[in-house]
Amino acid sequence: MKKIILIIITCIHYSISADEGMWLLTLSKEKYEELKKKGLKLTLSEIYNTDSASIKDAVVLFGGGCTGSFISANGLVLTNHHCGYSYIQRHSTIEHDYLTDGFWAKNYAEELANPGLTVSVLESMEDVTNKVLLNVSEVMTETERNMIISNNIKKIIESQKPSKFTKIDVVTFFNGNVYMLVKYKVFKDVRLVGAPPSAIGKFGGDTDNWIWPRHTGDFALFRVYANKNNEPAEYSPDNVPYKPKKYFKVSISGVKENDFTMVIGFPGKTNEYCPSYTIEHVMSINPIRIKLRELRLEILKTAMDTNRAIKIKYASKQASIANYWKKWIGELEGLKFLKVVEKKKEFEKEFDGWANISYTNIEKYGNILNDFREVYKNYTPLAIKENLIHEGIFGIEILTKINLFENIVKCNDTAVKTNLKIVQQSLMGFYNNYIPIIDKQTFIKIFSYFAQNNYLINEIPTINKLNRKFKNWEECANIIFNNSYLTSLQKLKELEKFSPSKIKKIITNDYLFKIYSEVIYYFNNYLASRIKKYKTTIDSLNRLYTKAQLELIAKEFYPDANSTLRISYGNIKKYQPRDGIIYNWYTTLDGIIEKEDTTILDYVVPEKLKTLYYKKDYGKYAQNDTLTVCFIANNHTTGGNSGSPVLNAYGNLIGCNFDRTWESTMSDYYYNPDRCRNISVDIRYVLFIIDKFAEAKNILNEIEIVDYN
Ligand code: ARG
Ligand code: GLU
């Protein structure tokens, strides 16, 4: 990977805070020296090296959006319980409820396959900016530019001869100023090896999510399988455990305040160099998204609390809705508390001065901030509507599946029945975890809320008509859901008895189908092209603004997160969330016992864990009879870093990253070293659970434990 080193031209007041940043693993010499000064004991080539085994080979992209790491010579992968959650759920039934009871395979044969789950291992990253920008000139329009770029990218990817076991991406860094070719090997046979019960892996649940102090044992174990040549393959019973180039040794020597830590993973998306206008935009969108999710969560809570089967079916969906709902609330508070808009505006004042200093600057950068202001003025109201559709209307689950029915409505009569079968087939999994009554309640909540606020009521004819026709949305929903054939597999099967033309008619007249079609029509005809236009403008302004900042700032820059492999570094540290409160840097098993509340599901403690606690049966994982559960550090992380290995100065594993504190949730836009802390589960707690709680000696035996360093 070519290093991105940025040159200083003029310097104005702007600083990247100490320890801020998610850096490419090919650290610059300056950055590497800084890390060494902070305590790092590894050489650069031990971190990233394409010729021999290095850390990059031990950190994997788990599924689409999490990180994992190899922790044994036999392809054992450590990630978070919440990253494996939907897979654990899919294996769970009331009889074998692995969500509640946990799961531990006693041997390879008991490990459970997970169709669709992949683990991707990075092969290489290479700067291809020149190839991507070939034939691009500064005078062309954004549309022309984008067309040339996407053609160039297509050619680059094709020249790599992608296969079904490779993932070849060309990814932009610094908002369109740098491009990299990123190649992965994709493993498709990934099996569940072990997961603690949710009362450990999700202890504290949504109540504690994004919160410190935390006591969650948020880990799960999977294994990557390969063919006999150690290459990726489709699932087969003949596959064998993959032998990774590198895996992490696990350190039980313990962590102390101020220890150096690194988090290596695949952070998803940040926007650190944006103008104040982006922050204002986020601050106007968040309250709406929060409200819409709140409405949906209320319904789920009531339903899940009353029935165990519903609880299992909706566990994973509920967790993902709740996760960002809470994140956005914290983010909004953090942006306000830190006065991020004001701070950005201060910077912008200085920027303006610089941008107007010379004719060249004026020509290139003189208008950026004005242009940003103008474009957001137009874009924000549309984005609000987009969110009303996305988080509101498509929060009604069935509406996200109606597109499949279009194939039936649009096809020749002769194909109707075959297409109906295809739809039934593709929706089987969906219906398995779908309860129409819950969706009906959501429908009522969302549309009543829309009606109260006059959201989209006048824009979508059917919604308008229903709003006038019925006394209330409850009455309306009862009729729509009772009459619909689209809300269960059984009802879909009933459709088979009708003639093809009748089937088409029934679907077309179904109110759910009508609402879906009209919403899509409205979006495509009234929103999509304008949204695209404004987003393109924002992208191009971001490119320019980032370029200007690169020219301007006297420090090395880190590129915003873009799901590529990064290293964040820092130290284990306490923090002061508010005046008069200091949060300690670690939590212990004592805190789990303290939090226990048998009447609140989030705080139920498994009996066996309590027995171990009272006997102080901690094996070699405790110090002075105290077992650390989680710790915090100021590593700059974001969504996607879940499951990331947390390493000490020697590159040994000390924890598994799983969250940020409430006070850090705004760090995707603004990192603050005093407030930002990532939360990790201490690896000794993980080993304790595997060893003492699960007594999974087979798993423990394959992990290489070091008790020095
Ligand atoms: N907040 C963490 C993350 O963003 C953990 C989420 C687990 N989900 C939950 N709803 N508790 O992924
Ligand atoms: N839990 C998050 C994830 O799934 C990590 C928390 C964060 O956003 O920092 O990646």
Image (spheres, helix red, strand yellow):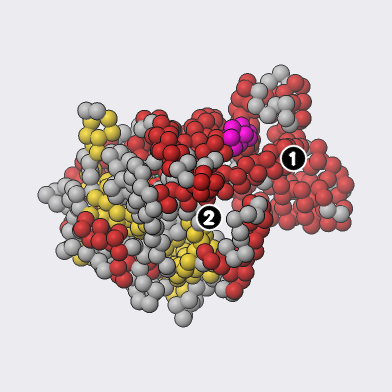
Question: SS class of the residue under badge 1?
Answer: helix
Outermost top residue: 471
Which residue is depicted at the point 59% across and 74% down?
159
Outermost bottom residue: 229
Does the magenta run of residues contain 48? no
Residue 608 vs residue 28, the one in the foreground = 28
Left or right position of 590 against 68: left
Which residue is identified by label 1?
Answer: 525
Residue 398 vs residue 572, the one in the foreground = 572
Tell me if mark 2 has few (under 14), some (14-19) or many (20+) residues whose alpha carbon lies within 10 angstroms of its own: some
Which residue is depicted at the point 75% across and 48% down?
405
Instruction: Tell me the quadrant of the picture where the C terminus can be found.
Output: bottom left
Left or right position of 389 against 365: right
Does the magenta run of residues contain 382? yes
Left or right position of 691 against 708: right
Residue 556 vs residue 678, the one in the foreground = 556
Q: Is residue 458 above or below residue 327?
A: above
Instruction: Tell me the quadrant of the picture where the N terminus can be found.
Output: bottom left
Q: Which mark is residue 176?
A: 2
